[in-house]
Image (tube, grey):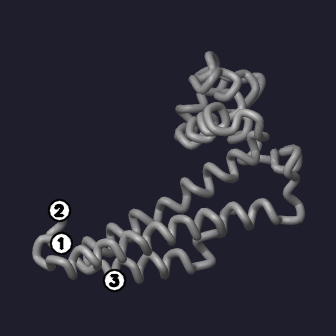
Amino acid sequence: MSRAVESGGEHGRRALLAGLSVLIAAIALGAFLRIHTALTDPSFDMHSATGLLKSDPGLLYYVTDRIVESGGAPPPDLRADPNIEWPELSDWPAMETVGQEFVVAWCKLFLAPDTPLHIVAVYAMGIFASLVAIGVYGLAYELSRRHLWASLAVLLYTGFAANYRTI
């Protein structure tokens, strides 16, 4: 139990519950804004990822698709892929941090097997990215020891347009 709850009694519990409510609302709003903005973009095709597969997003899609094809496990040639920098073999985990690709692949396999991968990626990463609000809330609470300040910090974070620049 936190010090605020221990020392604040009922007021501390209410402040904690109010703060957690604000945090949950900020996460939900952040995820909704990310997902809605991506899906309603006029150049976003709900049926085909072809137009999205240029440069880095195409590479991320390729690696994620390979993980899906491998049933959620690393593909056998993940450390010696012939297709990334052909004719050289590429060790993808040595070049980039592989993590989000597995999260998206597992979401595709276990939660939405009939949904196109690029749509699953929008939802999974929209939710995943909105979880940064937990860190914002936690840091603000750690620095101020007040749920009100932590709530205001997370609301400010959620309201910044720059927060959504990579949708």
Q: Is residue 87 above or below residue 31?
A: above
| Mark 1 element type | helix
- Disc 3: which residue: 149
- Amino acid type shown at disc 1: Val
* Three-letter code, disc 3: Trp
Instruction: Indicate the quadrant where residue 7 lies.
Output: bottom left
Label 2 secondary element: loop
Residue at figure coordinates x 53%, y 32% from the top left = 94
Q: Residue at x 33, y 83 (%)?
A: 148
Q: Residues within 10 Å of mark 2 (few under 14, many from 20)?
A: few
Furthest-left residue in this view: 7
- Identified at 50% across, 71% down, the residue is 25
- The residue tagged 2 is 1
Cα–Cα gap, marks 1 and 3: 16 Å
Q: Nearer the viewer, residue 160 or 97?
A: 160
**Measured Cα–Cα span from mark 2 to mark 1:** 7 Å
- Residue corresponding to mark 1: 5
Nearer the observer, disc 3 or disc 2? 2
Mark positioned earlier in the residue sequence (1 or 3): 1
Image location (x, y in percent) of residue 1: 17, 62
Q: Residue at x 69, y 38 (%)?
A: 112
Q: Quadrant of the C terminus?
A: bottom right
Which amino acid is tagged 2? Met
How far across and how far down the image is residue 91, in percent?
A: 59, 27
Report whether 142 appears left or right of 88.
left
Answer whether labels 1 and 3 touch (C-beta < 8 Å). Answer: no
